[in-house]
Image: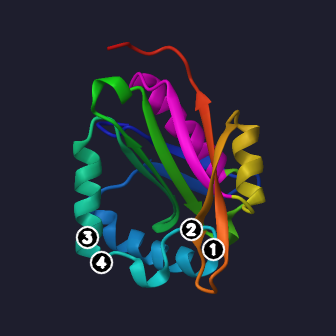
Amino acid sequence: MGDRAVDIVYNTPDSMKIRIRDAETKDAARIVEFLKEITTESEFLITCPEEVPSVKEEEEFIKRMKRSLYSLFIIALDNEKVVGSLTFIGNSRKKVRHTGEFGISVLKEYRRKGIATRMIECMMEWAKKKGIEKIHLKVIEDNLAAISLYRKLGFEFEGRQEKAIKLGDGVYKDVLLMGIWLGGGERC
């Protein structure tokens, strides 16, 4: 594993070998391609296709994530193709250092293979090692597959942000707040 926080090979039920590892600056172009694809196929992301960052911007984002002791950026790869992404943004301030929020996306053709589950499990294992006790997430109210996955992994509903998302056709969507208590960890 070296100096990477995460570096595993996950064997899907249909015998695919998916590598899950830390994102590196050398991955920026592949990540941008992934973002271009995922933003066109999923209505549940807050990023629109025209908002996908440039390769240079993505490189800078990866550098910032790697500098942060309490943040994690992992990708899922099928050979060299990025098929999934998870970012966990933690906090450096003492009173909230025990918390963080994550977002995840997996390409449509790679869903229902356990990839998102394994990525979240990797993130939770990493978080426990970092002393992070509470993980938050936000999910659009009608993303039922994601909500089901989060509940299966132990996340609970904690609240709702009404009309937090406004779609291009003027329709508003609520965002559900979910979280999981990992317990343990150090106190300030």
Amino acid carrying label 1: it is: Ser
Query: Disc 1 to disc 2, how far (Cα)?
Result: 6 Å
Please check the rendered image and state whether residue 137 is part of the magenta-colored stretch, yes or no: yes
Query: Disc 4 to disc 2, how far (Cα)?
Result: 18 Å
Query: Disc 3 to disc 2, how far (Cα)?
Result: 19 Å
Q: Residues within 10 Å of mark 4 (few under 14, many from 20)?
A: few
Query: Disc 1 to disc 3, how far (Cα)?
Result: 22 Å
The reply to whether callout 3 and callout 2 are in contact (CB within 8 Å) is no
Residue furthest front as drawn: 162
Which residue corresponds to mark 3? 57
Which residue corresponds to mark 4? 54
Which residue corresponds to mark 2? 45
Q: How is the image coloured?
A: rainbow
Residue drawn 50% across the image and 39% down it = 123
Q: Residues within 10 Å of mark 2 (few under 14, many from 20)?
A: some
Kind of element beneath mark 3 = helix
Find residue 173 and report its horizontal and vertical position in percent: 66, 67
